Image (tube, rainbow, N blue to C red):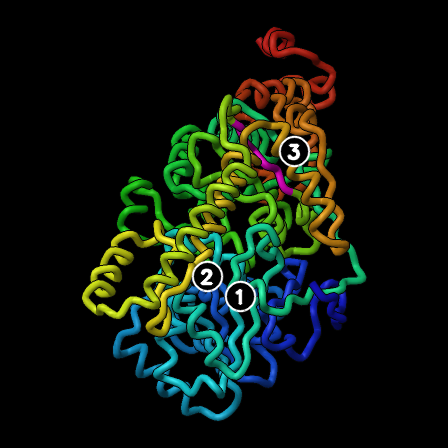
């Protein structure tokens, strides 16, 4: 990696453009990198991994002055952004209406920005002159992470990116060197040379059941009106859970309703079925006390909150929730954009690691993959020399059936070894079988991340006891003191009113005690029994 001198102010990039034909490791999330391509004096195709990211940029939750934007669901659709006439958001079905909008957009004067999902890159090629556009492949590490279920789309991105005027693969969490596919190994990689340092604090929360612990945290918020971490009160929570089924389990255990939460996940029939009546929301919808987020919005999406804490939920019983320490955690650390939020760079990681008595060591797995790749290389050599077209046609059909299970791919009528599959297998093995095999290995992975992620971050891994203490139920006398404090206030905020209601719902006799004894005497009492005796 080559250090790249950047222009920045207050933690935000102020460059006119990115270096060309390279991988650019911006190091920090939330530093305004995508905004450069969205606002500079170049035509850009900005390819992103999710629809949610397109929507979030085209229909931002906040305006330029920091005020809330309220968008109706019917307003949000592919087309020109209502806040930027030079920006076209493209995702979903490219029907006649969307094509007509795009054609009209392309005839306009001025620089053009098309923000699209990865699958639309190849679709755009016949509709534009690629040599008139630069392409920015945002969150490029997803080309490896998502290869298992977006194989065709990612292959198209890899095949087409060199057709554009220039290309840049952008990320704050690059693919680790030991898992980097050959297609990227030969591309120059620059790393932003930041002079400022962000401190990110991780609070490990080891437990028996991740969903039960998440529900317990929610109950703390409900019972007290807030959750206390390091002596500071949080009145809102974001739960990053990469499984809709796991989210439903937490909703059921905590007895939440639609009024209490919003759920940001893929808006499809299967997820509606899994959620059984809960609404599917988006990052542009008004915030609620509890927000649940799947990988649809782990990266690039902006959230705003004055007091929200980000909780990551990882269950060893659900492999989809075992998110990566090196790529996912730093991304989630940058989701809350409100600078005044005291928890902005703090993450609570709830996990229940499952000790594995026997597992294949990483070196053994790597040797097996290397043997398989060597066999694939020999097979590729044979196929490229094969003169019989019928044999090749039959082979193509077999490869198509195998899909992700083959290391061989056909590009431009020639067969090649596709090591994306091999590197994905290694990466998944490392994450699920090595990192999460025990509490000790997970904590050690965090420590290693702190050493290698770069000088723009300072990582602080808290002791497990911090969350154990935070989850200890408050004593009655703590609730009594808070009740008296709230009753003495001349005016209450909406959250304080809710907090007071939560306390009196749990201890209804406090209102009677306040009326009969007065706040001064009520404060001096110590027990529930004493108050009840005095008010009889």
Report the label total. 3
Residue 413 percent coordinates (x, y): 33, 72
Q: CA distance from mark 2 to mark 1?
A: 7 Å
Q: CA distance from mark 3 to mark 1?
A: 29 Å
- Stretch in magenta: 347-353
Q: Earlier in the sequence, mark 2 or mark 1?
A: 2
- In terms of secondary structure, where does tag 3 sit? helix
- In terms of secondary structure, where does tag 1 sit? strand
- Residue sitting at 48 percent across and 55 percent down? 144
Residue 325 percent coordinates (x, y): 59, 43
- Residue sitting at 48 percent across and 43 percent down? 428
Residue 178 percent coordinates (x, y): 59, 50
Residue 15 in which image quadrant: bottom right
Q: Nearer the viewer, residue 322 or 527?
A: 322
User: Are circles 2 and 1 on residues that touch, CB within 8 Å?
Assistant: yes
Residue 486 in which image quadrant: top right
Q: Nearer the viewer, residue 22 or 517?
A: 22
- In terms of secondary structure, where does tag 2 sit? loop
Mark 1 packing: few (<14 Cα in 10 Å), some, or many (20+)? many
Residue 77 visible at all: no
- Classify 310 as above or below 169: above
Q: Which mark is residue 49?
A: 2
Q: Which residue is mark 3?
A: 443
Q: Earlier in the sequence, mark 3 or mark 1?
A: 1
In the rendered structure, the answer to whether residue 371 lies left or right of residue 388 reads: right
Q: Which mark is residue 138?
A: 1
Residue 372 visible at all: yes
Q: Is residue 290 magenta?
A: no
Q: CA distance from mark 3 to mark 2?
A: 29 Å
Mark 2 packing: few (<14 Cα in 10 Å), some, or many (20+)? many
């Amino acid at each position: 990696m080559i250090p790249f001198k950047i222009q920045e102010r207050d933690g935000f990039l102020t460059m006119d453009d990115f270096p060309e034909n390279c991988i650019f490791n911006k190091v920090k999330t939330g530093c305004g990198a995508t905004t450069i391509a969205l606002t500079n004096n170049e035509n850009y195709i900005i390819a992103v991994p999710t629809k949610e990211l397109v929507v979030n940029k085209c229909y931002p939750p906040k305006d330029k002055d920091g005020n809330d934007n309220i968008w109706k669901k019917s307003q949000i659709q592919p087309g020109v952004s209502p806040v930027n006439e030079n920006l076209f958001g493209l995702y979903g079905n490219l029907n006649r209406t969307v094509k007509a909008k795009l054609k009209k957009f392309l005839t306009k004067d001025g620089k053009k920005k098309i923000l699209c999902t990865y699958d639309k890159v190849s679709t755009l090629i016949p509709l534009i002159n690629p040599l008139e556009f630069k392409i920015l492949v945002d969150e490029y590490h997803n080309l490896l992470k998502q290869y298992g279920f977006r194989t065709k789309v990612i292959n198209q991105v890899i095949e087409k990116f060199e057709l554009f005027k220039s290309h840049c693969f952008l990320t704050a969490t690059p693919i680790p060197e030991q898992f980097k596919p050959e297609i990227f190994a030969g591309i120059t990689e620059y790393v932003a040379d930041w002079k400022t340092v962000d401190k990110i604090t991780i609070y490990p929360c080891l437990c028996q059941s991740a969903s039960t612990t998440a529900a317990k945290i929610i109950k703390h918020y409900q019972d007290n009106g807030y959750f206390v971490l390091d002596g500071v009160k949080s009145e809102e929570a974001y739960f990053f859970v990469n499984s809709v089924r796991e989210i439903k389990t937490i909703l059921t255990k905590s007895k939440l309703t639609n009024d209490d939460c919003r759920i940001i996940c893929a808006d499809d029939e299967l997820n509606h079925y899994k959620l059984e009546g809960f609404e599917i929301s988006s990052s542009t919808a008004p915030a609620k006390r509890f927000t649940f987020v799947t990988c649809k919005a782990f990266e690039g999406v902006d959230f705003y909150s004055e007091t929200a804490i980000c909780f990551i939920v990882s269950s060893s019983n659900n492999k989809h929730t075992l998110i990566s320490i090196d790529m996912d955690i730093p991304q989630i650390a940058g989701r809350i954009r409100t600078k005044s939020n005291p928890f902005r760079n703090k993450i609570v990681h709830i996990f229940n690691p499952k000790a594995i008595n026997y597992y294949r060591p990483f070196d053994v797995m790597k040797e097996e993959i290397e043997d398989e790749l060597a066999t694939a290389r020999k097979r590729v050599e044979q196929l490229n020399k094969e003169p019989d077209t019928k044999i090749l046609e039959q082979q193509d059909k077999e490869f198509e059936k195998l899909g992700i299970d083959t290391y061989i791919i056909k590009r431009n009528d020639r067969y090649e070894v596709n090591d994306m599959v091999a590197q994905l297998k290694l990466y998944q093995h490392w994450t699920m079988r090595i990192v999460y095999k025990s509490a000790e290995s997970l904590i050690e992975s965090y420590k290693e991340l702190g050493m290698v992620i770069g000088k723009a971050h300072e990582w602080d891994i808290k002791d497990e006891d911090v969350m154990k203490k935070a989850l200890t139920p408050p004593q009655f006398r703590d609730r009594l003191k808070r009740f008296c404090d709230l009753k003495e206030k001349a005016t209450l905020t909406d959250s304080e009113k809710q907090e007071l209601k939560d306390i009196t719902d749990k201890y209804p006799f406090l209102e009677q005690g306040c009326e009969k004894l007065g706040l001064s005497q009520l404060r001096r009492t110590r027990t529930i029994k004493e108050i009840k005796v005095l008010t009889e």
